[in-house]
Image (cartoon, rainbow, N blue to C red):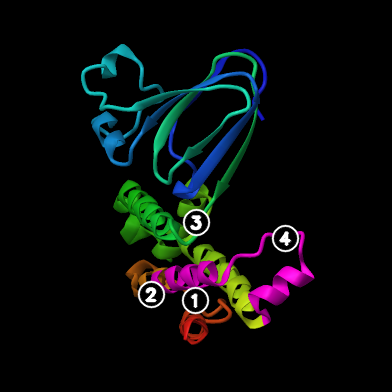
Amino acid sequence: MNTGTPSVTPFHADVFRSYSWSANICGRKKWLLFPPGHEEHLRDCSGRLPYDVTVPLLHDVCPPFLEVIQEAGEIIFVPSGWHHQVYNLEDTISINHNWVNGCNVSVMWGFLQAELSDVKSEISEWKETMDDWEQHCQVMLKSCAGIDYKEFFTFLRIIAEHRIQVLRDGHETNVLQRPHVMAPGLRHVQFDLRKIADTLVLLMDNQDFRNLDTETLHPCPEDLLTELERALQ
């Protein structure tokens, strides 16, 4: 919810590179939207992105973008990985929601890998002097991105278990027992499970994940993958 005098949300992409929608209850907003990859033209010599893409210094390098005026009563959808800058043109109340699903969970995984790479680059000079280097990097990853690799596994596991339960209960039974809940359809469930399985394979093959102590994960990644493959059959 945004209220008050006209203000600006600085240039950014949404958390975990999730999808988002924003509904204006009242007021007007201006959105500047950059397709994925266009933000790379705006990085400075240190690789940092600008706070404000409209400053005169960036006029000659700023790539093409979409400008949208959002009126009261309108909803805007922001695709995964689109950087944007938003202005409240007047007092505004809006409702916003972010989510990840089977269509962009691989994008979230790519985002976490890029964030960890940045962390390792920033503290690389202390690698030889730090005990449990990999765990320290995961702690810093969580501080920067809000989630680490083991928590990402837990995220995949929870969604997978929910989807598998829908298959076990039967979609029709689930709808009859919980008519107030929007239950995913059979193809939706199968699609999500396949995407989770594909992402889990990538996670298990990742050396940074394999370097971690995964004994506390239940079920273990291998058992979860077996359960996913069995459900998909």
Local packing at callout 2 (Cα closer than 10 Å; few below 14, some 14-19, many 20+) is: some
Q: Which residue is mark 2?
A: 201
The residue at the far left in this view is: 60
Contact between marks 3 and 2 (CB within 8 A): the answer is no
Is residue 35 shown above or below 221?
Answer: above
Q: Which residue is mark 3?
A: 139
| Mark 3: secondary structure | helix
Q: Which residue is mark 4?
A: 181
Answer with mark 4 or mark 1, whichever residue precedes in sequence: 4
Between residue 95 and residue 16, name the one nearer to us. Answer: 95
Local packing at callout 4 (Cα closer than 10 Å; few below 14, some 14-19, many 20+) is: few
Is residue 202 shown above or below 128?
Answer: below
Answer with mark 4 or mark 3, whichever residue precedes in sequence: 3
Identify the residue at horizontal 30%, vertical 50% (top origin).
121
Between marks 2 and 4 in the image, the one whose residue lies nearer the viewer = 4
Contact between marks 3 and 1 (CB within 8 A): the answer is no
- Region rendered in magenta: 169-198
Q: How many angstroms separate mark 2 from mark 4 (CA)?
A: 31 Å
